[in-house]
Image: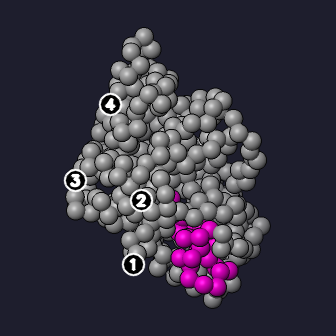
Amino acid sequence: MLNFDYSIPTKIFFGKDKVNVLADELKKYGTRVLLVYGGGSIKRNGIYDKVIDILKENKINFWELSGVEPNPKIKTVKNGVDICRKNLIDIVLAIGGGSSIDCAKAVAAACYYEGNPWDIVADPQKIGKVLPIASILTLSATGSEMDRNAVISNTETNEKLGTRHPDMAPKFSILDPTYTFTVPKNQTAAGTADIMSHVFEEYFQKTEGAYIQDRLAEAILKTCIKYGIKAIREPENYEARANLMWSSSLAINGLLSYGKNSKWSVHPMEHELSAFYDVTHGVGLAILTPHWMEYVLDGSTLQNFVDYGINVWNIDEGLEKYEIAQKAILRTKDYFVSLGLPSKLSEVGIKEDKLELMANQAARFGDVGSFKPLSANDVLNIFKAAF
């Protein structure tokens, strides 16, 4: 295990009716709030009205940035920055899933930057002062409610990039599992795949001696496997929604990555699918992950997959190692299919003539991943296998 400095600063208010702390928590940072949210779901399920009532009752001024896209666009970030500057916003409050929270983070980080907001996405070192950020989570998926990352798309350049800064971690996040009861089955499925992929990115690494991180990762994976399907079948099952919601936060808040030296593999590949085709992130991850697993399985990675098969899928440890590994990969693919997710890129509108371009884009900063470094040609082979 490597040396590390532990810091997970986001304050979490977890459970039913925890939105009642909202006013007191916001007032710690000011009374001029920018609300950031996506479509009409928060208005249909009553969350929006509840928040607005709380703000009005407590004489908290607010402005709104609505219509945040599923893969948030830099043009929307720019609109948010304009609102913040014109109205001297004190804190940015995202209501929604990872897209709304990521957009809010980028707005907060770009507010004090004098250049093009895309600059701070392309080069996080340009981020200086960041407006305080808070979130009310309505979708278990990205873990953005408890991390310092944001992923933003630029349709003009067909780029989807991640940026990060310590001050982009929300000051507080409200996690009420009942707010996810109305999430559609396809979004619940994609969110579960996204959570699992975050865990995979840290679990499948070469750092030795990080035993506790790997056992924690396995626990989160088993939780997703148990409750992802249950949440789809029983959307108002509080136990299922609560376990998925907390798994979402724990998967990417740093708990699994501390003490490891990791460079992600499947996420940068999927980002190209979303950049060119606006594919739902979790769907792209579910399609690519089993094919990536098959591609990187060899003598140097075998034991990682054996541990995964035995500890997560309860595969008989008496079987031959390659058989355990291959069964684990097949069960991963079958599980995603059981959630109703597609298994081929061709099923989500990806065109074969763009595969090479996307592969080259994925590897434009160098080899993809550190578990088994992948060249542009390796990425292309995975894309072709997944097509």
Camera-near label (2 vs 3) is: 2
**Crowding at label 2, few (<14), some or many (≥20) Cα neighbours within 10 Å?**
many
Question: Disc 2 and disc 1: Cα gap in Å?
Answer: 17 Å
* Helix, strand or loop at mark 3: helix
Q: Pointer 1: what residue?
A: 156
Find disc 4 in the rendering and name its residue.
330
Type of the residue with mark 4: Leu
Q: Is residue 220 above or below residue 195?
A: above
- Measure the C-alpha gap from mark 1 to mark 4: 38 Å
At which x and y percent is residue 12?
Answer: 67, 51
Q: What residue do we see at 36% from left, 48% from top?
A: 378
2 or 3: tag closer to the N-terminus: 3
Decide if residue 62 is in sight here.
no
Query: Secondary structure beneath disc 2?
Result: helix
Given residues 385 and 281, the one toward you in this image is 385
Q: What is the chief secondary structure element of the magenta stretch?
A: helix
**Lateral position of residue 327 relative to residue 64, left or right:** left
Q: Which residues are magenta?
A: 96-124
- Looking at the image, which residue is at 40% across and 63% down? 361
The residue beneath circle 3 is: 346
Percent from the top left, x then y, of residue 375?
41, 52
Residue 374 appearing in the image: yes
The numbered disc on residue 362 is 2
